[in-house]
Image: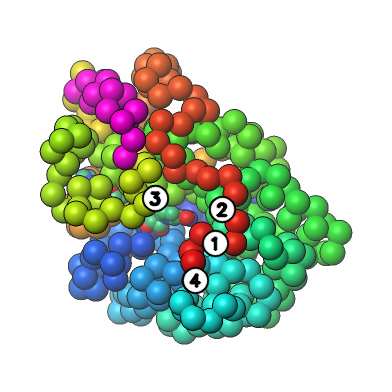
Amino acid sequence: MDYRLLGRTGVYVSPLCLGCMMFGARTEPDDAYAIIDRAIDRGVNFLDTANAYSRGRSEEITGEALKRNGKRDRVVLATKVHGRMDDEDPNAGGTSRRHIMQQCDASLKRLQTDWIDLYQLHRPHSEIAIDETLGALDDLVRAGKIRYIGTSTFAAWQVMESIMVSRERGFNRVVCEQPPLNLLDRRVERELIPFARTYGLGVIPWSPLGGGLLSGKYRDRNDLPKDSRFGRAKLSPMQQRRLTDAIWNPLDAYHRFCEARGWKPSQAALAWCRDRPGVTSPIIGPRTMEQLEDNLGSLELALSEEDLEELDAIFAPGEMISPFYDADFGPGLFR
Ligand SMILES: NC(=O)c1ccc[n+]([C@@H]2O[C@H](COP(=O)([O-])OP(=O)(O)OC[C@H]3O[C@@H](n4cnc5c(N)ncnc54)[C@H](OP(=O)(O)O)[C@@H]3O)[C@@H](O)[C@H]2O)c1
C-alpha cells in the first residue's frame, strides 16, 4: 500500500479512506464489521465517520468493530461535529464551544476510544465566530482527546481565516479539509486544492463516486437501479438536485471511455480522484462487501496523461455538472 502523509502532519494514511456513513443506515452492523475488518486487512488504515451519521449509530458500529478486531491502535480514526443531534434542543448542533465539548465526549464514548485522530468541523457555521470554535478544538487537543483538527466543505477563505486565527491565538491549526470532489463536480480544483497544496493541507474528498452516479450502474434516466441511492422511492431534496438532466450525456461518454479500456467506471473514477494533485485519500462509501472489494480494486489502476485529457474533455476541469459542493450552507444545513 502506498501510504501518504496526511497534510503536513507526520501521520501516514492509506490512499483510500473507508467512509462509515452507510453503517447503521443501509448497512447492518454485522455486515459493517465485516467490511471494516476486510478493509483493514487489505491495508486501509484510515476511517471516517461523523456524530450525525444516523445520529450516532455509525460511530457506535465503527467503535464496536474496532473493539472486536482489536485494531484501534492501527487505525487513523476521523469523525466530525456540527450535525444536528436532537430536533428540539437549539444547542444540539453547530460549532459552539458548548456543543463541541459535549459532542466530543459523546463521540469518544460511542467510538469506545480515548482519542480521536482527526476531529473535523462538518461544515462552516456562519453565525458562530471561528475563534470560539478553534479555541474549543485547541483545548481538546491539549486535553489529549483529539490529535488533529480538520474541516469539511469549507471554502478556501474559511480555512485560511481559521489558519490566521490559529496563528494569532497560538492554537493548533487545521491540518486537513474534506471537500466533495468527483468527476461530476470539480469546482474545488479552482481554489481550494491549489490553496491546500500551497499551505500543506491534507485533502480527503467525499463522494468520489458522486454517491454512486459514477459507479457505472446509472445508464438510463427512466430506469434507475432499484435499491440504489438515487433509484430509491424517496429522494432527499439534496439527492434530487444532484440527479440533474445534465449528467446523462457525460455519463454515456464516460461509460464509452471505460468500455474502450476494459475498465470498471467505479474503479476509474476512484483512481482519477485518488491521483489528483493535492489529494491525499478519497473517502469511499461502500454499502456492501461487494462494493468494498470493487472499490479496493481501483488501487490497481492508474490513469495516463492521455486518459486524463480524454476525461477533461468529458468533465471539464473546475466545472460542475451535478452539484455536490455548496459554498455557504449557513447554520441550517443539518436542521
Ligand atoms: N463531509 C461530508 O459532508 C460528507 C458527505 C458525504 C459523505 N462523506 C463521507 O464520504 C464517504 C463516502 O461518501 P459517499 O458514500 O457519497 O461516496 P461515493 O463513493 O461517492 O458513493 C458510495 C455509494 O455508491 C454506491 N457504490 C459504491 N461502489 C459501488 C459499486 N462498485 N457498484 C455500484 N454502486 C456502488 C453505493 O450506493 P448504493 O449501493 O446505495 O447505490 C455506495 O454507498 C462517506 O461514508 C462519509 O464518510 C462526507
Q: Residue furthest right?
A: 168
Q: Main secondary structure of the magenta part?
A: helix
Residue at image mark 3: 238
Tell me the quarter of the picture where residue 68 sits. bottom left
Other-residue count near label 2 (Cα within 10 Å), few / some / many at <14 / 14–19 / ≥20: some
- Going from the N terminus, do you reach mark 2 or mark 4 first? 4
Residue at image mark 4: 84
- Left or right placement of residue 225 versus residue 80 in this view: left
Q: Residue 238: x percent and y percent?
A: 39, 50
Cα–Cα span, label 2 and label 4:
14 Å
Q: Which mark is residue 227?
A: none
Other-residue count near label 4 (Cα within 10 Å), few / some / many at <14 / 14–19 / ≥20: many
Look at the picture and state if 152 lies above or below 219: below
**Residue drawn where x is 49% and y is 28% of the image:** 319
**Residue drawn where x is 31% and y is 40% of the image:** 243
Q: Residue 14: x percent and y percent?
A: 43, 51
Residue at image mark 2: 329
SS label for mark 4:
loop
- Magenta segment range? 243-259
Tell me the quarter of the picture where residue 249 sits. top left
- Going from the N terminus, do you reach mark 1 or mark 4 first? 4
Q: Is residue 31 magenta?
A: no
Residues at badges 1 and 2 in contact (C-beta under 8 Å)?
A: yes
Amino acid at dot 3: Met
Residue 242 visible in this rendered orientation of the protein: yes
Residue at image mark 1: 332
Cα–Cα span, label 4 and label 3:
17 Å
